[in-house]
Amino acid sequence: MKWPSHGSNPHYLYEAAGLKQPERILDFSANINPLGPPDSLKNHWSEFFQGISQYPDPHAASLKARIAEREGVEEEQILIGNGGAELISLLGRMLTGKQVVIVEPAFSEYEQACRVNNCQIEYFALDDSGELNFPRLLERLSHTDAVFLCNPNNPTGVYFSRNIVIELLQECKKQNCLLIVDEAFYDFVVEYETLVPLLKESEQLLILRSLTKMFAIPGLRLGFAMSSKERIESLAAYQSHWSVNGVALAAGTLCLEEDDYIKRTQGLIALERERLFSFYKKNRFAYSPSRVNFYLLQDMELGDQYPLFAYLLQKGIVPRHTFNFPGLEAKWLRFAVRGRVENDTLMGALAEWRSNHRSSL
Ligand SMILES: Cc1ncc(COP(=O)(O)O)c(C=O)c1O
């Protein structure tokens, strides 16, 4: 059975599971803002259409200028990408043949990008509670060219504080090792502490961001990287011309004005996550201590979660499998935090599951 390597597009999942897809499904497998794209995008849609008969700006100048102003970096320190995914694959090319450490479990594209570029990959496992065993990681950094750290972590939703990253960065500086911090979900963390000022002190830091999750535009594809000018210049050399389309560039500029929408999203997610977690606590489901819009879930009375996974799929509720997350392999399922109605449907299905699979304890 070949499981799809990402969430979304659930028909592939039903196909792999050999199950018939119900007519109505609720997809919890992709971690997209349940509010949908901001209204400003809908309001400007016809302007975007006017732009599609022209080539996009290959330098993405106005979006870059907006990001530079917002983040307090220079434009030359930014590379806009066709989603964070493109930037990860460019990083893989830049690191061809090098020694990399991937802190696992993590987004599977790091491994994929490194593997196709013949990197020597070492895995460093988070501990069972999703935390970083820091001294052990530092020991692994000698002879390492780059470390991938997903923060907040996908799939656990655990957020590592700035102090942890600073300590890691200090060791990376000593070892001349590039620290790649993927912050695709940073804007869901209410207490997020920015790492951007550290770019001034360290050539060894590269921060990845995505606009597709918070602004619910995965179909448009948009992300960016920030690092030293030299590092950004070498990364950009691998990118194809016009790789980011004009609609994404225009939409991105509008998204960066949406601070109220971000706050509204954070409020909704915090409330819903709390409701879900208190239900799980009462019903003997374990969950990861997530600070973002997704979390891991486990029926504590099952080892392999496949029976629960198949039960939910048959009900039209689509979790994200964890077969391709090293260390998790089917012992957990991942769910996005969606809106109130959808989360109620999920809890209803899990309550029914629990009443049919009562604890023998
Ligand atoms: C941790 C992480 N980084 C990067 C990406 C890529 O996002 P995108 O290419 O949509 O910007 C994803 C997508 O799921 C992700 O989970």
Image: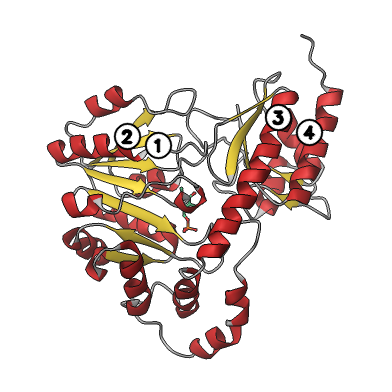
Which residue, given by chain and number where applicable, does mark 1 sit on?
A: 160
Left or right side of 24 for 76: left
Which residue, given by chain and number where applicable, does mark 4 sit on?
A: 350
Mark 4 element type: helix
- Residues at marks 1 and 4, CA–CA distance in whole angstroms: 30 Å
Report the colour scheme.
secondary structure
In percent of width and height, residue 306 lies at: 69, 30
Which residue, given by chain and number where applicable, does mark 2 sit on?
A: 164
For the point 32% across and 74% down, the residue is: 65
Mark 2 element type: helix
- Residues at marks 3 and 4, CA–CA distance in whole angstroms: 9 Å
Task: Please report contact status of discs 3 and 1: CB closer than 8 Å, yes or no.
Answer: no
For the point 36% across and 41% down, the residue is: 149
Amino acid residing under circle 1: Phe
User: Which sits earlier in the primary sequence, circle 4 or circle 2?
Assistant: 2
Amino acid residing under circle 3: Tyr
Q: Residues within 10 Å of mark 3 (few under 14, many from 20)?
A: some
- Residues at marks 4 and 2, CA–CA distance in whole angstroms: 36 Å
The single residue placed furthest to the top in the displayed view is 361
- Above/below status of 225 relative to 148: below
Amino acid residing under circle 2: Ile
Q: Quadrant of residue 359?
A: top right
- Above/below status of 221 relative to 298: below
Q: Residues within 10 Å of mark 1 (few under 14, many from 20)?
A: some
Query: Which of the image's four quarters has the C terminus?
Result: top right
Task: Please report contact status of discs 3 and 4: CB closer than 8 Å, yes or no.
Answer: no
- Residues at marks 2 and 3, CA–CA distance in whole angstroms: 29 Å
Task: Please report contact status of discs 2 and 1: CB closer than 8 Å, yes or no.
Answer: yes
Which residue, given by chain and number where applicable, does mark 3 sit on?
A: 280
- Residues at marks 2 and 1, CA–CA distance in whole angstroms: 6 Å
Task: Please report contact status of discs 2 and 3: CB closer than 8 Å, yes or no.
Answer: no
